[in-house]
Amino acid sequence: MAISTKNSQYDIQADGLKKSFGNFEVLRGVDLHIKRGEFFTLFGPNGAGKTTLIKLLATLTDPTSGNLHVSGFDVKKEVNNIRSTIGVISHDPYLYDNLSALENITFFGTLYGLDDIDNRARCVIKQVGLERRMNDIVRTFSRGMKQRLSVARAIVHDPKILLLDEPYTGLDQNGSQIFGEMLSDLKSNKRTILMTTHNIDEGLDLSDRIGILSKGKIVLDCPKSEIQRSSFKDLYISKVED
Amino acid sequence: MNKVWAIIKKDIITELRTKELFSSMLVFALLVIVIFNFAFGFSAELLDLAAPAMLWISFTFAGVLGLSRSFALEKEGDAIIGMLLTPTDRSLIYAGKMISNTIFVFLVGLLMVPMFILFFNYNFLSTLVPLIPVIFLGSIGFVSVGTLFSAMALNTKLREVMLPILLFPIIIPVIVSAVKLSEQVLDGNSLLAASFSLKLLVSFDIIFLTACAVIFEYVIDES
């Protein structure tokens, strides 16, 4: 029977989470607890295990050992419940290039089992500011527009939790600014957000709490208020190099 | 059912816009038929003997090309991950992909037959009609396994090479049954008269379809 954590104050609960690929241990006992409505940014260098952690939370792969609950549901036993409550935004847009923006969002909305899909799709496309390009083929979109549309894909089913895996990758300055504003809107809707990044400047602004993942382990987890922005870079480097 | 239809509709819209699968499969199939025709010269006796096998060799090679492309399109922009993130049963994803692939492969098979009849001097009407169900049943068997293996080959570096290597040994029973059935139909027998081959082909279709739908979940979630 699944451990009942549905009434817990935490939307993400990982205890002793491990993930190995063959003999290579990518995550080496991650403990992570993210409160409902919290914006948690997880910093880490390339190869630290950030994407693997997001994949575990998104039920795209199974943990080797440890406990993981998302929105109170056990990641090993209640995958479809978890999938209904999470939205994932990555550096890849997870969209079909040969479909229009509206066709893409309608397609994913159907797979989420939504009612009144057409209206909902139009609504989220408008929310990300792409209503004028709604019927254009995604292949013709810029990188920034694709990323905004991928936000529409991720929130079409109004998820409680958003998982963001290096979402700023490949965005230019203007694209990053627009994306940052959208994240700020998403945060104000009381969603729980976990963002991974290796870019210190992008990650600090919106966070309530921050963590550092290095070599498959969380080496720092603290409220942002305890961190001095000016000295964070040195702290990050010292934690990652340890 | 809505979810299966959404996947089929998405694949059909994509194909209507890109024409990648259909045109490459059809042109390739026709080229193989033409090459076989020239290779065997104009010996009517030899052509009669080899015709059913040539039909299915052309069909199989063209089909592999289409199946490989079908999942390559899912891989572009990692759209397949977007699909896997939704609370959709993996068997429904398999059903949607399998049905849309069957539609494309079957249509290519249908268009191949008139060319085949023309090149191999068969009577058009008496051959075309009974060959349609054979092509249909062969398509189901071929695509049911092909959809599974093209998903399996999705993340391999040599996808185009891996797919035929994985697929051909497994689909031998389907192709052999389809060749036998086509041979009897081309000899002028009715489908019912060739009931053993027909039953064999239908049986392999059911076995492969059921087994692949069950296995697909494990294959796609690890890819």
Image (cartoon, coloured by chain):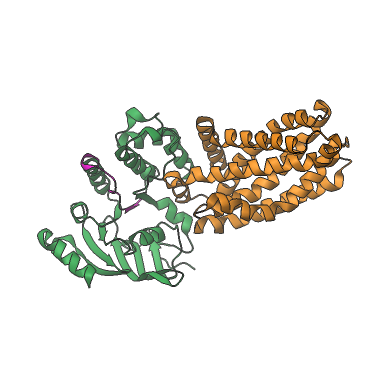
Q: Is residue B28 left or right of residue A156?
A: right
Quadrant in which residue B106 is drawn? top right
Which of B109/B80 is in front?
A: B109
The magenta stretch is A160-175
The colour applied to the residues of chain B in this rendering is orange
Q: Is residue A88 left or right of residue B31?
A: left
Query: From where the camera sits, is residue B89 visible?
Result: no
Residue B205: x and y in percent read: 72, 49
Residue A59: x and y in percent read: 44, 58
Quadrant in which residue A138 is drawn? top left
Quadrant of the drawing holding the C terminus of chain A: bottom left
Q: Residue drawn at (47%, 58%), measured in percent from left and top? A: A79
Looking at the colours in the rendered structure, which chain would you say is drawn in green? A
- Residue A163 magenta-highlighted: yes
- Residue A37 magenta-highlighted: no
Residue B56: x and y in percent read: 73, 42
Query: From where the camera sits, is residue B8 visible?
Result: yes
Q: Is residue B173 left or right of residue A146?
A: right
